[in-house]
Image (tube, rainbow, N blue to C red):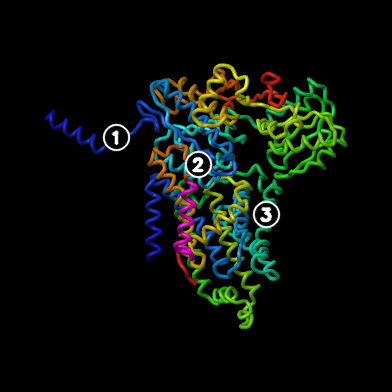
Amino acid sequence: MRRVGIALALFALALSGGGWSHGLAQLAMVATWALAGLGLVLIVGQTGQLSLGHGAMMAVGAYVQACLVSIGMPSPLALLPAMAAGGLLGLLASLPGRRLGGLAFGMSTLAMALIVEELLVRLVPWTGGAAGRVVPPFVIGPWTLGSPGGQAALSVAMLVLAWLVCRRLIHSRLGRAWRASREDESAAAAIGVSAGAVRQQAFAAGGVLGALAGALSAHWLGYLSPEQFGIGLSFELLMMVFVGGVRAPAGAVLGGLVMVALPQLIATLRGAVPALGSGAAGLELLLFGAVLVLIVLARPAGLAGGGR
Amino acid sequence: MRRLLTVFIALAALFAGPAPAATPGVTDDSIRIATIQDLSGPIAILGAPIRDGIVMRLDEENERGGVHGRKLRIAVEDSGYDPKKAILAARRLLGDGQVFAFLGNLGTPVVMATMPLIVEAGLPHLFPFSPHLATYAPTHPLKFQLFAPYRDYMDAAVRHLVGQNGYRRVGLLYQDDDYGLEVMRGVESGLAKRGLALVERTGYKRGTTDFASQIARLRAADCDLVVLATVVRETVAAAQEARKVGWPVDMLVTASGYSAQTHELGGAAVEGLYGVSVMPHPYPEGADGALNDWIQRYRTRYDADPNVWSAMGYDVADTFIQGLRAAGRDLDVAGFARAMASLNTTPGFLGGPTYHFSPEDHLGNRRGRMARIVSGRWQLVSDYLE
């Protein structure tokens, strides 16, 4: 309950700056990023594996969605192949996990992110190459989700659904196997849990969620280019879940709030204090960094706390 | 009865709050605009001087009393080159309903993500720093652009140089991305008009520092002109490599390599290098009256020397002000857009091009000038090329 309170207070504070449309646009972004964060909570929080390539899952979802919608597939239908592609990429990314563990495996996910970014530049007929491609708005039946209200509604609905599925997964036999492999691989093997196999499932599930977030954000941004999906994005996502709390689904939402809404809040406050003027741009980054450090110091397990 | 009516009107006025401005961002004595810059991301090195140039020009206008009695205010937002942040910034500014236009937004992802929101909200989207075609074509009543795609500049530059110096074997070193490909198209079309084709082309990946194999390949093709679709560091590295292996070939770099850093870093190796200049670099040495005054004012204000990006920012704001003047005292978006669509700017002391807009063509200029590094600094060696 307290977590929800913190979230609501943060959001209300961030909202107060720029009117409804800005607030709803933020809500859409927070919910979309939280979706990607949920994927990381499964991979990093539950199985304890470092994924430095989550941005690639978003990229695959975004580009598959954009391609399919551009050839005339209805946007809600296109979400399914986009998510499947993300799951497949997650599965691929987890293959080295059968041989590698820890940091070495983390590096292999980083390599995958680099390969995907490079492919986005090379596969010009589908991705538009470095010049990027425009994505039309999300259309459900007669409704075109061009306004932030519709975008927020769809993102939040997807987030709630994904949250329920994640909770279910975490409390299931599979979730227990994930945590067993995280705590002690040999002990898990002794009770018949194959660490490699359950990691693969976590990566596939995480990939599906990452791709869903990517597909939605493709519509919200309206324009895709490879540089948006560099390794910086993967690190940003990782930072988001660590700040929010990597062990609990709530961590993804709180992390999303901090990463998306906090810079906006700082920008709004700066606007309200004219003395700072327009010359104090570095200030926003400085304040943001300081708040992140404070959060990590005060709550090492993230805002959402320990969790499972 | 009359008193009652007066009270009623007074009350109504009270509850209605301040009368809604007829045109967003415009009041009797002020005009508020916005710009989305990169002040903390990968191209902050461009964003900061652009912002400084814009703000300086607006403030100068305000000191002279503003445009038609209205002072100019600007909201500067930092996107960090992140389209997500840019969209939220644009929504916040649009939500306030207190912005008249967006001016000089920086970076293609940022521009492409926010431009639809801005023009849908009915606000002018002016002079973005992005070479993307969508910023002016197809013609949209609210989109105006000053900077042409690389293709246009390079087509003219290659034609000019080949015509002047009689090159027969032209080669290309290009960055392996959309920038490089865009330049390649321009070079090819320029050569085709002279009845030539590229005799060799060789690419490199962004971040490459060693150009030994590329230069060897271009040399083996016996090129007499090498076009460089490079940025500053690669321009210097490629020129140094050619000089190191004792190859005194002529080279031509795009507007991306036209920077004071090129000769500061390259020294003797880049002496004689041709470049395309869209806006001349504001060198303090040898600057005449008005330009020298401007450089001194800029230095006093920002404690730094202006560069070509500061000049572009200043130019962007100046063109906007000329548009506002042409639109007259009764300012609304439609009137401003009409005025912009027939604007012919007067040249300023910075030596930039004049911009011509028409209802059919909202790209103000397609022409660059040839420059050459002589005695360690860029000198303009041609007029604007057709």
Mark 1 or mark 3: which is in front? Answer: 3
Would you identify the image quadrant in which residue B194 lies? top right
Mark 2 sits on what residue?
B78
- Tag 2 secondary structure: strand
- Tag 1 secondary structure: loop
x and y, in percent, of residue B333 in the image:
44, 28
Q: Is residue A111 left or right of residue B111?
A: right
Subunit under mark 2: B
- Tag 3 secondary structure: helix
Say yes or no: labels 2 and 3 on the same chain: no
Q: Which mark is residue B18?
A: 1
**Magenta stretch: helix, strand or loop mostly:** helix
How many angstroms separate mark 1 from mark 2 (CA)?
Answer: 30 Å
How many angstroms separate mark 1 from mark 3 (CA)?
Answer: 54 Å
Q: Which residues are magenta?
A: A284-303
Q: Which mark is residue A114?
A: 3
